[in-house]
Amino acid sequence: MIKYTIQRILLAVLIIVCAVATMFIMIHAVPGDPVNVMLGPRATPEIKEALRARLHLDQPITTQLFYFFRGLLMGDFGYDLRSNRPVLDIILEQFPHTLILVTSALIVSTIGIPVGRYAAIHRNGTFDRIVGTISVSIIAMPAIVVGLYMLLFFSVELRWFPVIGAGDKNDWLDYLWHLTLPVITISIAWIGYISRIVRASMIEVLSQNHVRMARAFGLPESKVINRYALRIAVLPSITMLGVSVALILSSTVIVEIIFSRPGIGSLLYESVLSRNYPLVMGAVLFSTIFIVAGTTIADLVNAAIDPRLRKEKD
Amino acid sequence: MSSGKREQVEIRRTNRIKSLFGKLLGDPMGAIGVLIVASFLIIALFADVIAPYEPNKIDILNKLQGPSLDHLVGTDQLGRDTLSRLIHGTQIALLVAAISIGLAVLIGSVLGAIAGYGPTWLDFIIMLIFDTMRSYPVIMFALAVVVLFGPSLTTIIIIIMATSFPTYGRLMRTQTQTLRKSEYILSAQALGISTPRILLRHILPNTIGPILIVASMDVPFVIALEAGLSFLGLGVRPPTPSWGSILNDGFTYIRNSPWILFSAGAPLILVTIGFTFLGEQLRDVLDPKISKDR
């Protein structure tokens, strides 16, 4: 396990290094002087010179890459072009909103577990068939359509939910109320997904020997299902969620923009519109690091629970 | 091979395709999938004939109208017929999906085959490329690329291709790794058949099924990504009709004219259901190992 953990963490670091380097190369692949792109046409030569020196653009590209990495290691993601504040500070201000949204969506997604459990027990029944068809249809449903339809029906037409913002932070009821539609938008596809995974693994586990054994011993059916089958059947979906952080974060961007919520997605979008270069790069790199960390942890947790996975990858 | 034998092979091949379609249409889910996908293809091909109006024809006097006999789903803020714009938007959506997924499958398959068949160090490097590309959140990566290279149809296609080729690459790698140890590949090697020929003639045909399944399921994601970027004003440039930019018009006029938003979401939902159902059914037909109950 220790060997696997070290290997996995080294790989994660390597992936982050590659991701950062790719981003760096992309910035430099842009035709024209990056300083011109960053500052726009109205900047004076002095300002351009200053930025060039600060970003070490006057030095060879390998040296630049070195400075770039050294900066990242020390938490220096660059400076906002407008307010001149450190990019990391701005990101960390916005990130909690995104984190709350993602976490709530993950928690709500677990509704899929009892749904999948029920469908597996009553396999091929009416409930199973209906849930099966619905979950297939919603798994790939784009967050953009779900979000906009939610907004249209529940906020604009029915006026049940607020249209914009994250609500008053000190009033948790108001905050929750603002959170409802965005969370449903993100988690609806995952509820479908998890219910399918749980159903599938549940059916597999129920046919295994230890479950048959438990039944043979005359344990009550509810105990067999909850204690012996469900506990194992839930594992694959937990891994699935960990690996899917990237997808969840992607739909978060769209959801934050549609519902005008603060967060890293809105921040990114605003910076894209105002061509605030360092902020765009900072937000993408920060999210990438978050994702790599998420998938690595999911992999490690999984390996700790299921030793077979360790062997396969060793 | 004599001409008679070749004919037989041809007949067998047509029969196989026929039975594949038969099985696809036999299940209600598959039939719905095929029906929806086929309709969208027809709409895209004959958009000029089907659309009742010219998609960019401005008619300010009739702006933001609700559904009527003249305009079945109403008009937008410039009086353009929403239905005609949606019909023409189908072309962009399917074009982007076809080109970008096609390129992603091509690049992914080549890299995946090399990774699965080649030496270990090469496998490691290629896998690292795949893992790196998969660690970017797609929309964020897309926004960064757009801010760097400017919004255009080409940029969108490149973004989608760059973010989805690892999926096909990994699939191809796994398939190649499994197949390379099979007896018929070993005997092909023993016969001295060259590696490119083994990959092309003996391994590739056996991986088409899984790739087709994944590609079909990938279409909704790709179309949604294009729509998302166009929605944010960073995709297809106006006035070219795209589902995403029509969604954006609907979002802007959500209070005055909810019809635009409502009708612009519908094709996205239908396309998603169509391709997902098709993919599911393809999996059941092509891959008997993964049966429905699993």
Image (tube, rainbow, N blue to C red):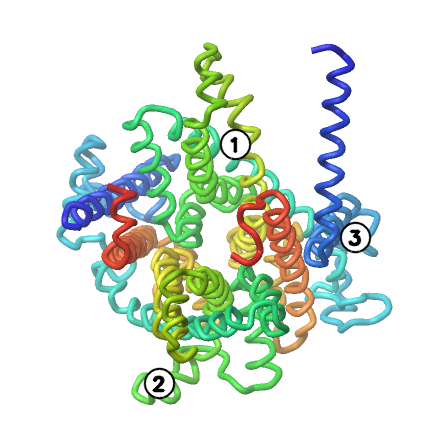
Q: Quadrant of the N terminus of chain B?
A: top right
Callout 1 amino acid = Leu
Q: Nearer the viewer, mark 3 or mark 2?
A: 2
Could you tell me if residue B12 is visible in this image? yes
Q: Secondary structure at mark 1?
A: helix
Q: Which mark is residue A168?
A: 2
Q: Which mark is residue B106?
A: 1
Q: Which mark is residue B54?
A: 3
User: Where residue A259 sits in the image (x, y, percent)?
Assistant: 47, 73
User: Where residue A154 sits in the image (x, y, percent)?
Assistant: 57, 81
Find the distance from the CA under tag 2 to the CA under tag 1. 50 Å
Q: Is residue A234 left or right of residue A184?
A: left
Which of A10 and A31 lies nearest the eye of the viewer?
A: A10
Which residue is located at x 76 percent, y 61 percent?
B81
Q: Going from the N terminus, do you reach mark 3 or mark 1 first? A: 3
Could you tell me if residue A282 is visible in this image? no
All told, the count of numbered labels is 3
Q: Nearer the viewer, mark 3 or mark 1?
A: 1
Find the distance from the CA under tag 3 to the CA under tag 2. 47 Å
Q: Chain of mark 3?
A: B
Callout 3 amino acid = Glu
Work out whether B89 lies above or below A176: above
Callout 2 amino acid = Asp
